[in-house]
Image (cartoon, coloured by chain):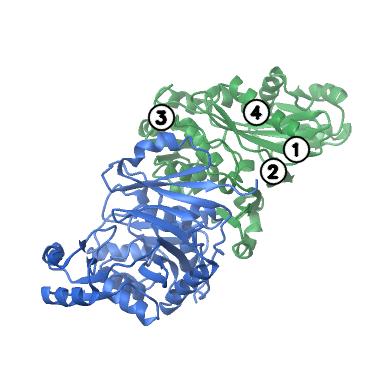
Chain colours: A green, B blue
Amino acid sequence: MTDPLHTGAVIGILGGGQLGRMLSVAASRLGFKTCIFEPGGDCPASHVANYHFQAGYDDAEALRAFAQAVDVVTYEFENIPTSALDIIETLRPIRPGREALRISQDRLTEKEFLTGLGLQTAPHAAVDSADDLGTALESIGTPAILKTRRLGYDGKGQARIMSPDEAGQALDDMAGSAAILEGFVEFTHEVSVIAARGLDGSVACFDPGENVHEGGILRSTTVPARLTPTQRSDAVLLAARILNALEYVGVLGVELFVTPQGLIVNEIAPRVHNSGHWTQNGCAVDQFEQHIRAIAGWPLGDGMRHSDVVMENLIGDDIDRIPAMAREPHAALHLYGKTACKPGRKMGHVNRVKPGKP
Amino acid sequence: MTDPLHTGAVIGILGGGQLGRMLSVAASRLGFKTCIFEPGGDCPASHVANYHFQAGYDDAEALRAFAQAVDVVTYEFENIPTSALDIIETLRPIRPGREALRISQDRLTEKEFLTGLGLQTAPHAAVDSADDLGTALESIGTPAILKTRRLGYDGKGQARIMSPDEAGQALDDMAGSAAILEGFVEFTHEVSVIAARGLDGSVACFDPGENVHEGGILRSTTVPARLTPTQRSDAVLLAARILNALEYVGVLGVELFVTPQGLIVNEIAPRVHNSGHWTQNGCAVDQFEQHIRAIAGWPLGDGMRHSDVVMENLIGDDIDRIPAMAREPHAALHLYGKTACKPGRKMGHVNRVKPGKP
């Protein structure tokens, strides 16, 4: 256990998107400076950070200079090249650690890790060839979904197989990448737990949120989620089991399917998570600050919420509705400073706060 | 009325202290970039801003370059040299406008403006000489307080006169500056209203907060304040009268004494105000975002609060209590990134949120 970081310490963040941006703002609230490593130039996080290294993840010299300029390194996305991490970790601690990245970078490894902990996942099988896919479809059945094992997000690198005759096309869609076939899970709804583990091993969870996806992209999160008290404590215990197994430091997102047979883990993300954005306006310590507290060796916030919140993502031309949303009472806007608007691009989100007593 | 600013527009802020820092963060939430003008180097606002002009207020070239780099100019303190404003206003709009600055830069002008609006102030008289002071003390009596007309803040440039024989010392303390004698007001408590006026003339107020000062420095603000419904609406109407008279654009702080004879205006500040920091954790749109919305031509937030809050300033070695406060439930820390701690220096604040229903 190292000493907690103090005012003026520098948090290094790999990735300059909106998650890095909001991590950076949270770090500033605790008196820290931030340093962003991001190949792109005018990236969302660079607008609010002290320092910005604009260089590629294959630029060893820049990675070394970045690591030397900061006190601790964290990241906003899980697909960081191993070679970059190898360089950084000789110089500064990386939190969360390598094990969480190794597991979450590969859907198959992740599923095996989760089932090894005694947690339920969707039925699945590795698919490296047409033969594998045939065998997998026989045991799992259709409908099913074929996914690349690595580098997929927001519904990319996925192909649905509604009947066995779609198998060939789905395999072609993987373009030769190692894949995993997942059976469909009959769920009533989807929730996620944003959980954190401190450097001292303490664990804190935010209240589970209920997620609605559209086209593979998160559309909204509502807190509280529809869960029985048992489901709620199951969700929290399950998240804690994952955190402890990984000796994790930081915030982790756990997506869960709610089914009559219990909670089934969909996937985990070793970082702050879109479904935790509601905490910005529902808790005294939000998920971004919680993550910074963890990696800085500070005590965790307790995760209690002071208000109910519905978070809506603003995707693509949803931003045309900003003038109207700016007039809504109790609506907190969070825009990412992206000037180019594309379909499917996350431009911001709005947290609609449901006031309590006052 | 000009068009509202959009994502990517740049807000120029004169002054790089904690108010500039929190304005900058709020601007980023709306997708704006910020540019700080501040003579000091490693200033709190520069940590979270896109651009920083480090130059003096007498550097005409830097002021011109700053103005040309931004879309609108605002400020975090009222004592900006007139010569600097003269340069900027030929290039970009300054919001709030010059009239608010002219009035609030001089305590006597401010008092005359307020009484001209039919508002109550402390009894007062201009003091430019020992004779003036003698005459003023005869009419106002003791105890009284002698203040420099210009450039005072947080209790600086003030001398108490408990009996007439202290007059000479008090006048010496002014060091030749034009001064104003103010009579003591018998008040039960002090409140402030954080009010805003948009570019379209609309007005919105946050709930009044109750302030406790120690040694001339704000110690805490509690919301809601102890006020009767009549006092509450008086406070809001009075703030609106000031805003409209100044054709103000932005957030204004109004400090009020609560007395059996009604509300007496202590002073106004043409900027975001320390007593409005509670809004960061009590409202969907806080005072900093409210100010940015106003100067950017956006609709104002409605000022409603979702939670009760007690704001405590962290002054000087109050920061030694941060580890303990970091463990408090529902406590939101806001540190300013200042590494040098001095007695009386504002290092941060903590908002203790009182949850409602959830």
Name the amino acid, label 1: Leu
Name the amino acid, label 4: Ala
Name the amino acid, label 3: Pro
Q: Quadrant of residue A116?
A: top right
Element at label 2: loop
Measured Cα–Cα span from mark 2 to mark 1: 8 Å
Residue identified by numbered label 1: A227
* Labels 2 and 1 within one chain: yes
Q: Depth-wise, is mark 1 or mark 3 nearer the camera?
A: 1
Measured Cα–Cα span from mark 2 to mark 4: 17 Å
* Labels 1 and 3 within one chain: yes
Q: Residues within 10 Å of mark 1 (few under 14, many from 20)?
A: some
Q: Depth-wise, is mark 1 or mark 4 nearer the camera?
A: 1
Residue identified by numbered label 4: A239
Name the amino acid, label 2: Pro
Residue A336 is situated, as x and y percent measured from the top left of the image, at 54, 51
Element at label 3: loop
Image quarter hosting the N terminus of chain A: top left
Measured Cα–Cα span from mark 3 to mark 4: 25 Å
Element at label 4: helix
Q: Pick the residue in front: A149 or A337.
A: A337
Residue B322 is situated, as x and y percent measured from the top left of the image, at 40, 37
Q: Looking at the image, is mark 3 or mark 4 earlier in the sequence? A: 3
Q: Chain of mark 2?
A: A
Q: Is residue B353 visible?
A: yes
Q: Position of B155 compared to A101: left or right?
A: left
* Labels 3 and 2 within one chain: yes
Q: Pick the residue in front: A166 or A97.
A: A97
Residue identified by numbered label 2: A224
Q: Chain of mark 1?
A: A
Residue A161 is situated, as x and y percent measured from the top left of the image, at 83, 35
